[in-house]
Image (cartoon, rainbow, N blue to C red):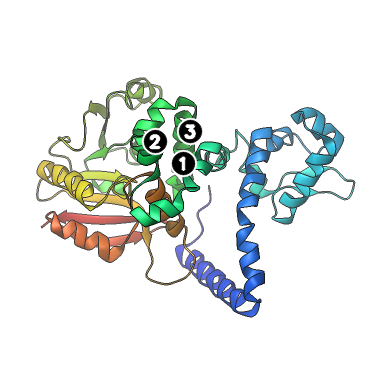
Amino acid sequence: MRIPPLPLVQTVESIRNLLATAYRRLVPGHVALMELITAGWITQAIHAAAELGIADELTDGPRSNAELAAAVDADADALQRLLRLLISYGIFTKQRDGRYALTPMAEALRRDSPVSLRDAVLLFGSPSHRNHWSYLVEAVRSGEPVPEKLHGMPFFEYLQRDRDFGECYDRAMSSMNAFALEPILAAYDFGRYETIADIAGGEGTLLTEILRRAPRSQGILFDLPDVIASAPDRLAELGLADRCTVESGSFFDSVPKGCDAYLLKHILHDWDEHDAGRILDTVRAAMEPSARLLIIEMVLPEHAGLHPGKFIDLEMLVQVSGRERTEDEYRLLLARHGFTLTRRVPTVSPENILEARVS
């Protein structure tokens, strides 16, 4: 995966925001609003394409509408209407001979794409996810997540009860983690740490890649027992069993002691100030004065322009009790629990690496 220079990405993002602002100011308000009102339909159209497996059927080359309809078991007329909309957004293309083909965005819908977002599309377009978001008004009024009122239980508990949705969620998170992996690894030198603990590291995707690129480092993968049950086998397959140990537990109780770096990737945004603070307290109790805490999150900008973190912030409001935060909000949260934010490392993705030390 080729990583573009960070200044180039930042310049492109600035231009994009300027163009979006100019468009909203030049177009009549009701026209711009109508476009936003119908934006949810494109999500469902992409979801339909992913569910049907259209991109997979085009992997070996362009196909006619009739061939594609037969392959995905769809009505030919309805399929071409779906593709007509998706082509307007650059998802798929129609060649001069009438056959459909992949585009770079459509490539990301393939199951076997190097960076596939198919599982994320299936999650965000699923009936369960749409149902939760239909209660956004109630979440805004109460400030409380939807699943507890709708299902009588917290979001992560609901994922365990509804295993179809839970497995969809797990696959989506894995695919989105892979999406941000290369930018994170390109932006930060993890090899300067002798021992790295990935707290609530899931399957260990980030930690194993760090260890593969930092041959002198050792790792500890820490998560709940059922989450890391298959981790030892995976580490053995990757040839990392002698450099990475697996420990189970809850970050509300204790974490491994004496490591040089502690990773919290997409952890704090799941929790409100109180519980995020509890996690920080636990990690701080395990850290030596020379250790570093590395928080990997989308850091909200102070500007009023577009940013994916603003969408995820509402997702946190709807689903759990967490939130996305600005740099100043992270600085204050860290300070309240005995940490000093030493630097913020941006990446070419929306992810940032916040480095902190014990105060």
Give the quarter of the image for residue 242.
top left
Q: Name the amino acid type tagged 2.
A: Thr
Badge 3 element: helix
Residue receiving disc 2: 205
- Taking the spot 84% from the left edge, 49% from the top edge, the residue there is 95
- Taking the spot 50% from the left edge, 32% from the top edge, the residue there is 168
State left or right for residue 166 relative to residue 330: right
Q: Name the amino acid type tagged 3.
A: Arg
Quadrant assignment for the C terminus: bottom left
Q: Dot 1: within a 10 Å radius of its alpha carbon, few (fewer than 14), some, or many (20 or more) residues?
A: some
Check residue 178 in the rendering and tell me which mark sits there, or answer none. Answer: 1
- Going from N to C along the chain, the mark reached first, 3 or 1, is 3
How many dots with numbers?
Answer: 3
Give the quarter of the image for residue 223.
top left
For this orientation, the residue located farthest to the bottom is 26
The reply to whether callout 2 and callout 1 are in contact (CB within 8 Å) is: yes
Q: Name the amino acid type tagged 1.
A: Ala
- Taking the spot 18% from the left edge, 47% from the top edge, the residue there is 280
Residue receiving disc 3: 171
Nearer the viewer's eye, disc 3 or disc 2?
Answer: 3
